[in-house]
Amino acid sequence: MSRPELIAPPEIYYGDIEAKKYTKNTRNQQIQADMTYRALELLNLPPDEPAFLLDIGCGSGLSGEILDEEGYIWTGVDIAPSMLEVALEREVEGDLFLQDIGQGFGFRPASFDGAISISVLQWLLNAETSHPTSSPPHRLARFFTTLHSSLRNPSRAVFQFYPSSDDQIQLITSIAQKAGFGGGLVVDFPNSKKAKKVFLCLYVGGGGGAQQLPEALDGEDEDGGKARFERRRERENSKAGGKRKGVKDKDWILKKKELYRKRGKESVPRDSKFTGRKRRPVF
Amino acid sequence: MVRLITHNLLACHVKGCTSNNFPLEFKDVQVVLRDSEFNPDFLRGFIPKIEWPALTGAARQLGDTSLPDQLPEMQDDDFLKVLHHVLLEIHVEEGTMICPNCKHNYPISNGIPNMLLAEHEIG
């Protein structure tokens, strides 16, 4: 798995070229869309109420587009100017901010009905300078405390991210708890290497009783919830045992000969009842 | 694309700047009007969050005086349409937002405000 967050800080890594590449890649689009829908599901917003959401690390607006489609009004923040430029070109509906989430937000208390963030938190785990405000714990603490105050009570924030170790998860959840959030981790498809997705579901308030952590998808209950590629892998595994069917059967040979004749190739053998038949072993 | 809906939620987040840091003042702005879909349910849900004097003040700075000084008790469709126009259809494309307390400048270029802080301003 590639780890772009280890190569350069986000505002540099997602320069003009990388931002365009990222947005045009249909695989990225698909994955982003799937994760956004899942994050919205985990947000569990009351239906029929158009909510005001915050998209943290909105990038080029791939997830914002889905928020538009679903009828939400949203505001996006991102640190990469090139990504925001692409978002402007794509004419997304939400307001965009150039902001470093590690520096905290300036939104008034209880501004948003919820927050989503797709593939962002891992970018906060690297220190770019030795200044004390650049250390990951400090940036995470600043991020979570200001986010906590800008969310309505009760509400939720859902972060999809790619942790590279359990320590990182531990660090993030403990800081989020200190900032006042409840909730925890939801891991979808924990047994699949490819389809595994980690969601951090954080709650603000909850009206006394703790909010119930949503159920993770494990791909066992129904076919639709299956991780992609899993069925193909099963098929390939089952194939390995049995004998494979020959590719060059009689039909294939006849087709080829026909093709050669059409192309005017000389000395193409004529078709007969022996065409494509196996020779006897004595031959 | 700073619309007044987000401007009304935005306070200064510079280190130590905790009082009188809202609303940010506009300066040298260029405004563009863009139509958007009218959604009365959303507006009704959003009204409790609005800081009314800040909204009318900002709207006046941008040259729109259609809002009343006080939030009216009766919120009929005509009022919601006016509110919709002010909140969601006025886009600030270029200009600066200035914190009334610490005078930090947040430049807006191409519709995107730059909220980045220098190292010594981070809380």
Image: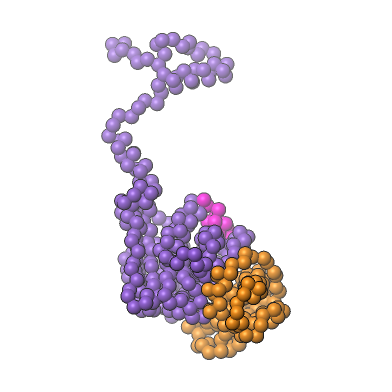
Chain colours: A purple, B orange
> In this rendering, does residue A181 appear at all?
no
Front residue of A213 and A20: A213
Q: Residue at x 38, y 46 (%)?
A: A229
Q: Residue at x 55, y 67 (%)?
A: A73
Front residue of A13 and A215: A215
Q: Position of residue A204 (x, y in %)?
A: 40, 75
Left or right? Give the position of B82 relative to A25.
right
Q: Residue at x 64, y 75 (%)?
A: B79
Q: Magenta region, mostly helix, strand or loop?
A: helix
Residue A41 in the magenta stretch? The answer is: no
Please give the range of residues in magenta: A16-26
Tell me how many marks there are. 0
Q: Position of residue A99 (x, y in %)?
A: 54, 73
Q: Position of residue A8 (x, y in %)?
A: 48, 65
The vertical placement of B15 against A58, above or below, is below
The vertical placement of B120 against A267, above or below, is below
> In this rendering, does residue B85 appear at all?
yes
Quarter holding the N terminus of chain A is: bottom left
The vertical placement of B53 against A177, above or below, is below
Q: Quadrant of residue A119?
A: bottom left
Q: Residue at x 31, y 12 (%)?
A: A280
Q: Position of residue A234 (x, y in %)?
A: 32, 42
Front residue of A189 and A131: A189
Quarter holding the C terminus of chain A is: top left
Residue A17 in the magenta stretch? The answer is: yes
